[in-house]
Image (spheres, grey):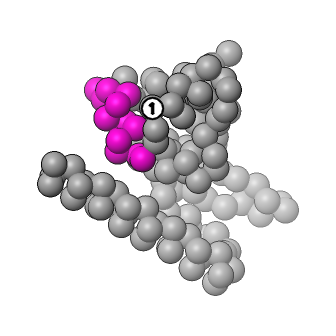
């Protein structure tokens, strides 16, 4: 059975990255990556979200190794999921604001990291 670390390692390899470059891009210490490999710890929720977004994979696949379905059922109502956009999804205004804020933060953090790399 593959672990979360195995799937992360597969993504790193498929994208032609080194583990060191991956850690630098996502602000992960090599020690933490080693702990994930040994099964001592696993990435936290926020880091899993960041890794999934970075590689463009679903959390279902990253965490469980399951391919995502195109439809999610909740209370008998279907929600169509189209990549990053969710059509016909009834989010509360507070939930939508949180998602927008998180996406803006992730973009900001990525741009800061890229700026740091350019200046070194």
Q: Position of residue 1 (x, y in %)?
A: 68, 15
- 23 or 10, nearer to the observer: 23
Q: Position of residue 28 (x, y in %)?
A: 46, 42
Up-down relation of residue 56 to residue 35 (above or below): below
Q: Which residues are magenta?
A: 16-27
Asked if residue 120 lies left or right of residue 1, the reply is left
Residue at 34% x, 57% y: name it.
Answer: 110
Q: Secondary structure at mark 1?
A: helix
Asked if residue 89 lies left or right of residue 51, the reply is right
Residue 24 magenta-highlighted: yes
Residue 59 magenta-highlighted: no
Q: Position of residue 115 (x, y in %)?
A: 21, 58
- 38 or 108, nearer to the observer: 38
Residue at 36% x, 66% y: name it.
Answer: 108
**Residue, far left:** 119
What residue did someone put label 1 on? 30
- 6 or 67, nearer to the observer: 6
Up-down relation of residue 21 to residue 2 (above or below): below
Asked if residue 63 lies left or right of residue 86, the reply is right
User: Does the image show residue 65?
Assistant: no
Residue at 79% x, 59% y: name it.
Answer: 74
Image quadrant in which you'd find residue 96? bottom right
Main SS class of the magenta portion in the image: helix
Image quadrant in which you'd find residue 73? bottom right
Q: Position of residue 5 (x, y in %)?
A: 56, 27
């Amino acid at each position: 059975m593959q672990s979360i670390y195995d799937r992360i390692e597969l993504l790193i390899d498929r994208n032609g990255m080194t583990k060191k470059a991956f850690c630098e891009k996502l602000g992960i210490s090599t020690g933490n990556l080693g702990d994930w490999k040994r099964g001592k710890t696993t990435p936290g929720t926020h880091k899993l979200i960041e890794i999934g977004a970075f590689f463009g994979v679903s959390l279902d696949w990253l965490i469980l190794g399951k391919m995502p379905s195109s439809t999610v059922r909740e209370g008998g109502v279907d929600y169509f999921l189209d990549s990053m956009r969710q059509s016909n999804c009834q989010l509360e205004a507070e939930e939508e604001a949180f998602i927008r804020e998180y996406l803006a933060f992730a973009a900001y953090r990525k741009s800061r990291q890229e700026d740091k790399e350019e200046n070194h």
